[in-house]
Image (spheres, rainbow, N blue to C red):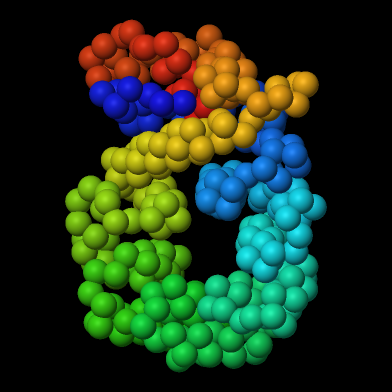
């Protein structure tokens, strides 16, 4: 799915009503690539991890759990799969099941990631004292880790101690000026508490534009912050960058998966044939409204009205 480099498809601003006009039953990524247990079993670790990371970042929790079921069936009870499973269940709000998975995981090895998930699940179940204790543990044991500090601050704020949460983040930022994770978390907490002055002060510290160092998860949260504010241009810029990143990640994943896709009779396909049959333009339906909106956007933002072969469908895949 290599889009020519002189055309940045994902930077096209497509109006929100384009998404609203799409069919509800949009094929999942696994369906689009026709991923089966046989294909999953054949993937080398680097491609397997690339698929997992894409699903975790850009797909639903349900799809993440479906992939994990395939992986457990074909590759056994790998320890790191428990982390992905707990994350997906947390996204679904199944806190009791999250704790069951985390307990299994921590019997073998306790990590910062597992403790952060544990704290959030405990909070979700209303076990406030236990959640606070885990937050205390990670903020003290990992005092120089932005994710540990941010999670602890969010736990404290959720328990009604917003002052402690903000104090923890500002203390960390005093040592690690400009840290994106801590800064964005502080902005989000300030926004939730209607502390507009504090929120704006730290938004100003982020500067203009989108930092190239911001992670996909951080950018998603920043986009949500802008969506809840009056900063429409910033919100649009964040969503455009997310679209661009998703498209690039999709292209890379498609290139990595192509050699392992198979035909109906089970034989390996040539890369270009697999691309066309399973995930190329031929497999993507673009409605008249989507086509019209995309064409209007290319004229409005780039000054031209014609797209190369496959570009229309490529853009439609991430809308």
Is residue 280 in view?
A: no
In this picture, residue 223 sits left or right of residue 75 = left
Is residue 87 in view?
A: yes
Percent of width and height locating residue 295: 38, 13
- Residue occupying the point 26% across, 66% down: 202
Percent of width and height locating residue 150: 44, 74
- Residue occupying the point 75% across, 26% down: 266
Foreground: 28 or 294?
Answer: 28
Percent of width and height locating residue 6: 26, 23
Percent of width and height locating residue 158: 55, 76
Residue 62 against residue 121 in the figure, above or below = above
Question: What is the number of callouts on the image?
Answer: 0
Image quadrant of residue 235? top left
Residue 306 against residue 225 in the figure, above or below = above
Residue 281 against residue 134 in the figure, above or below = above
- Residue occupying the point 31% across, 85% down: 171
Image quadrant of residue 93? bottom right
- Residue occupying the point 38% across, 24% down: 3
């Amino acid at each position: 799915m290599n889009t020519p480099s002189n055309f940045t498809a994902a930077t096209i601003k497509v109006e929100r009503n384009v998404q609203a006009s799409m069919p509800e039953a949009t094929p999942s990524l696994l369906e689009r690539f026709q991923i089966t247990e046989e294909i999953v079993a054949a993937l080398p670790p680097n491609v397997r991890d690339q698929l997992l990371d894409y699903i975790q970042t850009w797909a639903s929790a349900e799809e993440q759990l479906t992939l994990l079921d395939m992986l457990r069936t074909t590759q056994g009870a790998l320890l790191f799969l428990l982390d992905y499973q707990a994350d997906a269940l947390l996204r679904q709000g199944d806190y009791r099941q999250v704790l069951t998975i985390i307990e299994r995981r921590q019997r073998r090895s306790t990590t910062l990631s597992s403790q952060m998930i544990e704290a959030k699940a405990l909070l979700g179940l209303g076990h406030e004292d236990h959640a606070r204790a885990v937050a205390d543990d990670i903020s003290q044991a990992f005092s120089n880790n932005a994710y540990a500090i941010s999670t602890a601050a969010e736990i404290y704020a959720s328990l009604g101690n917003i002052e402690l949460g903000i104090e923890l983040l500002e203390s960390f930022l005093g040592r690690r000026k400009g840290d994106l994770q801590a800064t964005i978390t502080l902005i989000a907490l300030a926004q939730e508490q209607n502390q507009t002055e504090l929120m704006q002060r730290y938004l100003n510290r982020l500067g203009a534009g989108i930092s190239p160092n911001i992670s996909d998860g951080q950018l998603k949260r920043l986009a949500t912050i802008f969506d809840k504010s009056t900063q429409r241009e910033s919100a649009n810029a964040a969503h455009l960058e997310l679209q661009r990143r998703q498209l690039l990640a999709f292209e890379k994943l498609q290139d990595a998966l192509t050699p392992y896709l198979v035909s109906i009779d089970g034989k390996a396909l040539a890369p270009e044939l697999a691309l066309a049959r399973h995930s190329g333009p031929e497999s993507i339906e673009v409605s008249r409204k989507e086509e019209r909106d995309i064409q209007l956007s290319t004229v409005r933002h780039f000054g031209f009205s014609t797209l190369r072969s496959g570009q229309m469908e490529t853009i439609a895949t991430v809308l």
